[in-house]
Image (cartoon, grey):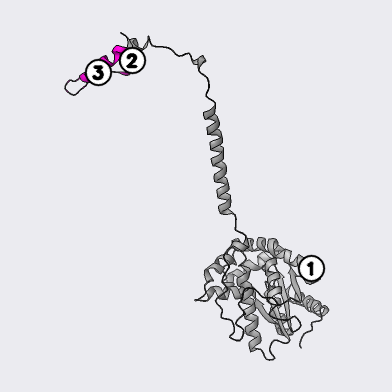
Amino acid sequence: MSLRALPSRLETLTRLSKPRAILPPVSVFQTYQFIRPYVAGGPRVDPASQKLKFWPIVFIFFGGTGTFMYMVKSRANAESPKPRSQQRPIKMPAINPPADNPKLSAPAKDTPTFSPTSVSVIFVLGGPGAGKGTQCANLVRDYGFKHLSAGDLLREEQDRPESEFGSMIKDYITNGKIVPMEVTVQLLENAMTDYMKNREGGAAGSRFLIDGFPRKMDQALRFEEAVCPSQFTLFFDCPEHVMQERLINRGKTSGRSDDNAESIKKRFRTFVETSMPVVDYFETQGKVVTVEASRGPDEIYEEVKKRMGEKGLEALK
């Protein structure tokens, strides 16, 4: 039977397969045996005569490659930070500036707020646990400095109930990261202004020790341009293992969230990567006084007093 007779035969099978008649089950092999006579005489296709179609392969290759490159580029653009000029400006801390100086919290100034001829600023740097706080307390007692700790100011702002930046500051400190410079510089400037406003004699002769600042180059440059140029930087140089031991012991009683092993490692890494370039920068200007800080507190302070005298600063008593 030719292929032309196949449709009528299939129609007969379809009619018989209706529910009116119950047929015995038919296996795949039986079906094949049934239709084989009708297709065996059909035209055969020689596989060797078939040509490979090239264009679909080209389309799939280049289409897939192009899609992959687009996805990679889109992800890179999404993850890369925007330039500072395109970023949203960070609001200043919600600390009210003095009423007699409404421009205090302005983000930019043409000249520093304070003159270095009337106000002395000394930066105090060193790794976490280098003993900066202990030596600053000695200098406050003997030299009449006002001690400002950037870390303490940030923690106070963090704990202030109405602060807009408390949670942000806490996240940065806990993870060993540096808080945005706009926040830190503004806190320091406001603290200096409040102190001189209430100080007998006003701003003239004021001495400031700014502890743990600047921790990045942008902080250093911003502070000196907008607030006051520093006199020099007092750098306490201490080995990492000594600092780590001190911090772990301090953490037993300090209650500070960053005095734990994980945060300590992050703080060490951050200091080396971001703060040491600040020390190197000021050293090229001859504005660094380095003190070896792995010894006991009294021995360290003796050297501090000697180095302060070399800079023309003598104790008040």
Which numbered marker is on residue 32? 2
Question: Which x, y percent locates residue 45?
Answer: 45, 14
Q: Secondary structure at mark 2?
A: helix
Hey, which quadrant is residue 234 in on the image? bottom right
Question: Which x, y percent locates residue 31?
Answer: 31, 16
Q: Residues within 10 Å of mark 1 (few under 14, many from 20)?
A: some
**Mark 2 or 1, closer to the camera:** 2
Q: Residue furthest bottom?
A: 200
Q: Which residue is mark 1?
A: 283
Q: Secondary structure at mark 1?
A: helix
Kind of residue indicated by mark 2: Tyr
- Please state if 105 lies on the left or on the right of 39 as rendered: right
- Please state if 116 lies on the left or on the right of 13 as rendered: right
Which numbered marker is on residue 237? none
**Mark 3 or 2, closer to the camera:** 3
Residue at horizontal 56 percent and vertical 38 percent from the top: 65
